[in-house]
Image (cartoon, rainbow, N blue to C red):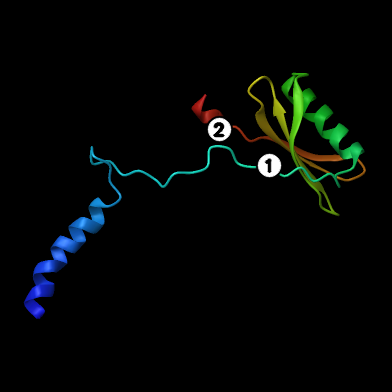
Amino acid sequence: MTSFFMKAGPISLALGLLAGCTSDGTSQPPPVASATPRLMDESVPPAARSACLAAVSNATNNGDVQIIEMIFSEANSQVTVGVGPTRAPWNCLVSNSGVVANVMSMTNEGAL
């Protein structure tokens, strides 16, 4: 019985290691859904939405802006704004009365 496990151990290990590889021997991550659903929380007040659109438009010097995600919070809401034809994401943290606390690009600019 012991000799069976000693012989089968390396084979099982090899099969386990190869299970995550493709035919060319490279490892591939598990498939991911192509489009992540976005949350559009309608509780975010219009003043906060408008303030974020204006702040991102001003920061990017681009008037082609659109809200692509909104998350309401009693303290500050988070609004994600897409910029330009590719809708490059920008994160906006804003009070519900419309005071913008922070605007930040969510694009990996190092890859550009």
Q: As drawn, is 38 to the left or to the right of 58? A: left
Disc 1 and disc 2: Cα gap in Å?
19 Å
Identify the disc placed on residue 22. Answer: none
Residue 82, position in %: x, y? 70, 29
Front-most of residues 22 and 79:
22
Marks 1 & 2, CB-CB < 8 Å contact: no
Residue 26, position in %: x, y? 27, 41
Front-most of residues 57 and 20:
20
* Residue name at image x 23 percent, y 51 percent: 18
Q: Secondary structure at mark 1?
A: loop
Front-most of residues 42 and 64:
42
**Residue type at numbered disc 1:** Arg
Residue identifier under label 1: 38
Residue 48, position in %: x, y? 87, 39
Q: In the orientation shown, which residue stands out farthest toward the left?
A: 3
Question: Reading the chain from its start, which is encountered first: label 1 or label 2?
Answer: 1
Q: As drawn, is 81 to the left or to the right of 24? A: right
Residue 70, above or below 12: above
Residue identifier under label 2: 108
For the residues carrying marks 1 and 2, which lies nearer the camera in this image? 1
Q: As drawn, is 42 to the left or to the right of 5? A: right
- Asked which quadrant contains residue 5, the reply is bottom left
Front-most of residues 41 and 51:
41
**Residue type at numbered disc 2:** Asn
Q: As drawn, is 42 to the left or to the right of 22? A: right
Residue 25, position in %: x, y? 23, 41
Q: Secondary structure at mark 2?
A: loop
Q: Quadrant of the N terminus?
A: bottom left
* Residue name at image x 30 percent, y 50 percent: 20
Dot 1 crowding, Cα within 10 Å, few <14, some 14–19, many 20+? few
Residue 67, above or below 12: above
